Amino acid sequence: MVEEHLGLEAWDEMLAQVEPASGGSYTAAATYDDEELLAIVGYLSERTGKPAAELIHDFGAYLLGAFHARYPRFFDGVTAKEFLRNVGGIIHAEVRKLYPDAGVPSFEYEDPGPDRLVMLYESPRKMCALAEGLIHGAGAHFGVSIELDHPRCMHRGDDHCRLELRFGDGRGTASP
Ligand code: HEM
C-alpha cells in the first residue's frame, strides 16, 4: 500500500528511518514482531499527518482486496454478511492451518436480524481499527454499504470490542 500510494522510494526511505529488526523484506510465510508494524504506522502517521488508527483502518480496507486476490475461494458464492460471518469459524481457522504461527483474533457473533450482524472481537493485539477497515473493504467488495457502531472497545478498557453492523441493502445479500 505504501509503495502504491507513496512510491517505492518512500518505502525505502521509510525503512532507512524506521530500521525494522527484520530488515523490512516482508514475505507471507514468515512471522514478524508486531512492533515493526506499529513503528511503520507511527512513522507514516508523522509523515502524512493522519492519525495511526485512520491509517490502520485504511490498510484494512486495502488488505481486503489483497486477500481477495490471494484467497478468492473465501469470497465465492457468499453474501457480504455470510463472508463476515465466516471469518471467525472458517477463514481464520484455515489461516491457522496454513500458517500455525499466525496471530489471528477471536470473533464471536450475534445475529439480531437479516440486515444486521454483531461481531465480538477479542485479541491481545487490539487491532479493531484493522477489523473496521476490513469490514468496510468487504462492503466495497460486495457492493453494499455497511454502517458500523463500536459501543464497546478494548482501547476503552472493555474485555472485547463490540462491532455492530447494519447492511445498507437490507440483508447483506449483494453479490460482487
Ligand atoms: C479472506 C479473508 C481473510 C483472510 C485470508 C484473513 C487472514 C488473516 C491473516 C493471515 C492475518 C494475520 C495473522 C498474522 O500474520 O499473524 C489476519 C489477521 C487479522 N484478521 Fe483476518 N483474514 C481475512 C478476513 C478478515 C476480516 C473480514 C476481518 C474483520 C472483520 C479480519 C480481521 C483480522 C484482524 C483484526 C487481524 C489482526 C490480528 C489481530 O487482531 O489479532 N480478517 N487475518
Image: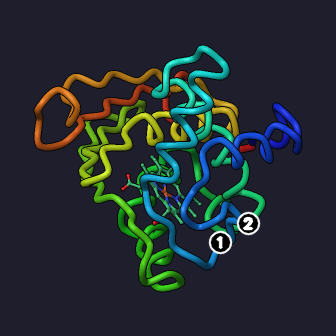
Q: Tag 2's secondary structure?
A: helix
Q: For the residue with label 1, is its CB less than 8 Å from the closest atom of ligand 1?
A: yes
> Disc 1 vs disc 2: Cβ atoms closer than 8 Å?
yes
x%, y% of residue 32? 50, 67
Task: Identify the element where label 1 is drawn.
Answer: loop
- The residue at the far top in this view is 49
Q: Is mark 2 within 8 Å of ligand 1?
A: yes
Disc 1 packing (10 Å; few <14; some 14–19; many ≥20): few
Category of crowding for the residue at label 2, using alpha-carbon neighbours closer than 10 angstroms: few (below 14), some (14–19), many (at least 20): few
Q: What is the quadrant of residue 24 in the picture?
A: bottom right
- Mark 2 belongs to which amino acid? Arg
Q: In the figure, 128 relative to 144: above or below?
A: below
Q: Position of residue 166 (x, y in %)?
A: 41, 26
Q: Residue at x 71, y 57 (%)?
A: 68
Q: In the figure, 6 relative to 88: above or below?
A: above
Foreground mark, 1 or 2, reads 1
At horizontal 57% and vertical 25% (from top left) the residue drawn is: 45
- Establish if 20 lies above or below 129: below
Disc with the residue nearer the chain's start (1 vs 2): 1
Q: Nearer the viewer, residue 84 or 7?
A: 7
Please identify the quadrant where the N terminus is shown: top right
**Is 23 left or right of 103, judged from the image as shown?**
right
Residue at the image position 75 percent from the left and 43 percent from the top: 176
On the picture, is 4 further left or further right than 21? right
Tell me, yes or no, if residue 176 can be seen here: yes
Give the residue type that dot 1 points to.
Ala
Residue picked out by circle 2: 70
Image position of 46 with respect to 165: above or below = above
**On the image, numbered disc 1 is attached to which residue?**
28
> How many numbered badges does the structure rendering display?
2
